[in-house]
Amino acid sequence: MSTIFPRPEETELFTQRQYLPGKTCPKCKGQSIAEYPVLKVTGWTVIQKCQDCFHELESHPTRFPLGTNYIPWSSLLPEGESD
Ligand SMILES: [Zn+2]
């Protein structure tokens, strides 16, 4: 059981996607671009992604998409040796 979030009562969970009219995908020329938060290994990120081919147009880190201050364990790991 999670100590950060309570167990959800819904059977399916999803994030709200905000569609961005007027944007065009540079890969497939599709018009269906949506912005929504995702959890990457580097932490919460708001991305703009084509819903037709899943090309990522833009992304920027955010710390508060769900009203929490989640810091991923990966951010606490030391940097690796560079070759
Ligand atoms: Zn596309």
Image (cartoon, rainbow, N blue to C red):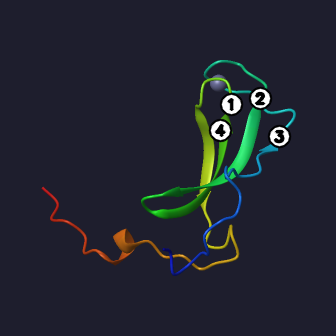
Q: Quadrant of residue 50?
A: top right
Residue at 86% from the left image edge and 32% from the top image edge: 22
- Report the residue marked by disc 2: 32
State if disc 4 and disc 2 touch (CB < 8 Å). no
Amino acid type at mark 2: Ser
Separation of residues labelled 1 and 2 (CA atoms): 6 Å
Q: Residue furthest right?
A: 21
Task: Please tell me which residue lies in front, 58 or 74.
Answer: 74
State if disc 4 and disc 1 touch (CB < 8 Å). yes
Q: Is the residue marked by circle 3 packed among few (<14), some (14-19), or many (20+) residues within 10 Å? A: some
Q: Is mark 2 within 8 Å of ligand 1?
A: yes
Q: Earlier in the sequence, mark 2 or mark 4?
A: 2
Q: Residue 20: which numbered mark, if any?
A: 3
- 34 versus 46 height, above or below: above
- Report the residue marked by disc 4: 49
Task: Please tell me which residue lies in front, 26 or 31.
Answer: 31
Which percent across, then down, holds residue 58?
A: 63, 45
Q: Earlier in the sequence, mark 1 or mark 2?
A: 2
Q: Earlier in the sequence, mark 2 or mark 3?
A: 3
Q: Is mark 1 within 8 Å of ligand 1?
A: yes
Separation of residues labelled 3 and 1 (CA atoms): 11 Å
